[in-house]
Image (cartoon, rainbow, N blue to C red):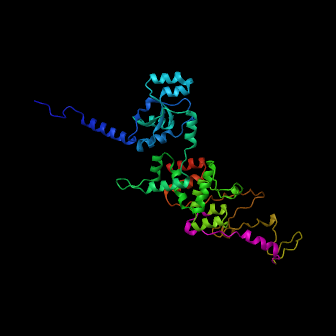
Amino acid sequence: MSQKPGLGRNLAAERAARKAATQQARLVPQGLPTVHPDRLMPSPENGRKKLLKIEELAATLLTDGMNTAMTVVPPDVYTAIYPQHKEAVSQRVAEGVLFVVHHGHRRLAAARAAGLAEVPILVRNDVPSLRIAAIQENLQRMGLNPIEEGVEFQAALSEKDESGKQLSQRELARRVGCSQTYVSHRVALLRLVPQLRQAVVDHWMKEQRIEDGEVNEEREDERLLLPVREAATVYARLHPDMQEAFLRGELAASQATVLSKVPADQQTIPVDVAVTDDCAAITEEPAAGPQLPEPRTEGTAPQGFAPATRAEDGPRPSRVRTPQHQADPYPGGAGAPEKSATTAPVAPVEEPRGVIVVRNVEELATSIRELLNQNELKMLAELLAR
């Protein structure tokens, strides 16, 4: 009796293998040659000695694949330019290495950490100077400015997948390999008025040392420069009218910081009484005030006060005023403790740090991180874990 097709085969394993192959093909751009990461070796002349955020990039490669091919060089081409590494390269070639990485050392480390079976490569055989080419690749890499990043992040958050679900900021941050705070700050920048957006871009350009031919060097100090963090956590929380007031000079930076803790629909420009009264205090005559009490001789009391009592006359009544909103613990003065001869200094009361406006959990977490130091954050985490 002939055996039926499929008997004795591990169909589940075959389906899993096909699914893994399909997933692997999705992670690798089509049309480019691919190679196993173990067949590549990092360049001994790589200028970036420490590779950062490998785990984050590895997680991104697992979900979205490697969208940019690594530039590699054949071993003989590499050793012709760097003969001092011929022995090390020859040893790795004997172990199965096919190419030396030119651009993409961080991607190679992340691909190995992610366990990818294939990575896309671009083979170069005519490289005049690997070192100059590496410098050019790093210097000419122009990223998006913070406002452009915010636009792209917001567009990605608005997209829906096949099931109609939208990404959260946390999920988007994981997929692109950055922190959730990084995403939330740049999305918050989109709430700025155009002039403040430009101030953020100008600050970014200055940090990147990008020459702007339209800006006169003599007027460089006149430009408003806003760091991303300050713009996202303070000015982006202001009502557009308050942002305009800040640009006109009607709202100081310190006042903007206070207003940013208040709901946008309740924000108004605070009136600084001390400033408005300064000129009047100089030009106007002083207003007539209450007469100062006459100097008193010993044994007399100022007008409006009871005569001082001696120790043998009994305890002196308390003169401490109780705030209107606070109940007097000793009504009518009965049972009040006697006042000691030496009064202990009163500890200063710490001013509150501000009001946290809770719009969502993510903004609440961002506000808490800005207000508390590391020890306070640790204490808060322990209290929340109880």
Q: From the top left corner, tell me how far across and down residue 251 is, in percent.
A: 66, 65
4 or 143, nearer to the observer: 143
Seen at 87% across and 74% down, the residue is: 294
Q: Is residue 278 magenta?
A: yes
Q: From the top left corner, tell me how far across and down residue 18 is, in percent.
A: 30, 38
Seen at 44% across and 30% down, the residue is: 38
Tell me: residue 84, above or below residue 194.
above
216 or 157, nearer to the observer: 216
Tell me: residue 99, above or below residue 317.
above
Tally the numbered discs: 0
In terms of image quadrants, where is residue 84? top right
Residue 213 located left or right of residue 161: right
297 or 91, nearer to the observer: 91
Residue 209 located left or right of residue 116: right
Q: Is residue 177 magenta?
A: no
What is the magenta range? 259-287
214 or 148, nearer to the observer: 214
Q: Is residue 324 visible?
A: yes
